[in-house]
Every structure is written in structure tokens, then in C-alpha cells.
Image (spheres, coloured by chain):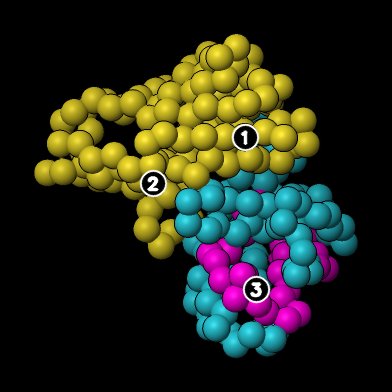
Amino acid sequence: KQEVTQIPAALSVPEGENLVLNCSFTDSAIYNLQWFRQDPGKGLTSLLLIQSSQREQTSGRLNASLDKSSGRSTLYIAASQPGDSATYLCALSGSARQLTFGSGTQLTVLP
Amino acid sequence: NAGVTQTPKFRVLKTGQSMTLLCAQDMNHEYMYWYRQDPGMGLRLIHYSVGEGTTAKGEVPDGYNVSRLKKQNFLLGLESAAPSQTSVYFCASSYSLAGVTDTQYFGPGTRLTVL
């Protein structure tokens, strides 16, 4: 069974700092890996999707990488802003064609 | 284009009561899902549907039933609510079944408390 781990559970950084969120998984047989953002009281919004054959994806200040051999993905956020404060979840699509989610990292960017 | 909507937003039930959560999507997606989110545990799949009239069990289906009578709607039912079903419930939809390139679109969630 796929296990997805996100460490740390919470992170607080000053505005302007570059930061990295981590996601690790146990089964490398995946279709894709996605990073979602969740704001308090809201649903999830997809930020980046990396296909199994890809190594990274970029969108604006966000860059996500995928290393299947080591079972790791990172989400890099450049020049963080208070508006980036949210919970970030990674999720993997595997052989069962269902998403398996990590428990998330709650990010707070301090002004 | 409203995307995925959920009704109601909040609900408080007593143990043993029943209720139905409604999910609607206007993107003509074939696939729909119900998840629950508990503190520290991420999202877990309850049931899903691959098309009108079809449903399948996910990771945590016990105590829930679902129906997909119309393509745009997916209902989640609790026949006899238990305190362990206190959670935030999310509905999602997608064009295909968690394939290589497809993501899921999520509703805003329903916060359910069972006393």
C-alpha cells in the first residue's frame, strides 16, 4: 500500500524567504504526483502536476521536482509572500488509479 | 461556471440520525469522488463513481452509501451517523480516473459534526 509522508507538519518563515516542502512515498509505480494548496475552510486547488516520466514542473514562483528512484518530491517556493500561507498537500496517482494524499504541511509566511 | 459545489456547508447531527450530502459539478466530468479529511490524516477516499449509475468503494467506505443517478450529481449518505464520522467531507470530479495528466477539482467541503 502506498504511504505518503510530508515533513514538517508545520513551517513558519519570514516574508521573502525561499523555502522547500518535502513529500516522500513508498511505491515508485505512479502515474503522476500532484501538489495541492488548501486554504482554511476551502477546498483543494491543484498547483502543479508532474507526470511519471517528468522530473519537474514550474509555475511562476513554484517549482516541483520528482525523483521516483528515491521516492521523493519537493515543492520549492521562491520569494515567499504572506498570501502563500496555506496547507500544501502532495498526492500520488498509482496503479489503483486513485489519489493517495499526504497529511500536508501548514505554511505560515510572516510579514 | 461554478465548478464543484457542495450542500450543505455545515451540519450537526445526533448519533443515529441520517443525512445526505449533495455534490454537483458543471464540467461534464465522468468521474466523481467523495473524500473525508481528518486532522493529521490527509484525505481518504470513501467512494467514487466512473459514470452515471456506477459507484465503487474507496479506502474507507463503511457506514456510507452513494448514488450517481445523474452525471452531474453525486450523493453521499449516512444512514446512522456515528461520532467517528465527524469530519470534513470533500467532493471532487475529474475528466478521467487519476490518469497520467488529469487532476481532480474539489468542492469547498462540508463540515459534519456528530454528537
The chain containing the residue under callout 3 comes to: B
A60 displayed left or right of B44: left
Q: Is residue B105 magenta?
A: no
The reply to whether the C-beta atoms of the residues labelled 1 and 2 are less than 8 Å apart is no
From the viewer's perspective, is residue B58 above or below residue A75?
A: below
Q: Residue A57 appears at what percent x and percent y? A: 47, 21
Separation of disc 1 and disc 2 at Cα?
A: 19 Å
The residue nearer to you, when weighing A11 against B6, is A11
Separation of disc 3 and disc 2 at Cα?
A: 25 Å
Q: Are marks 3 and 1 on the same chain?
A: no
Mark 3 nearby-residue class (10 Å; few <14, some 14–19, many ≥20): many
The local secondary structure at tag 3 comes to: strand
* Chain assigned yellow: A
Q: Which residue is mark 3?
A: B21
Q: Which residue is mark 2?
A: A87
Would you say residue A46 is visible in this rendering?
A: no
Q: Which residue is mark 1?
A: A3
Residue ID at (76%, 80%): B79
Q: Amino acid at mark 2?
A: Thr
The local secondary structure at tag 2 comes to: strand
Residue ID at (53%, 77%): B113
Specify start and end residues of the magenta stretch as a single range: B67-93
The chain containing the residue under callout 2 comes to: A
Would you say residue A17 is visible in this rendering?
A: yes
Residue ID at (46%, 35%): A6
* Chain assigned cyan: B
Position of the C terminus of chain A, as image quadrant, is: top left
The chain containing the residue under callout 1 comes to: A
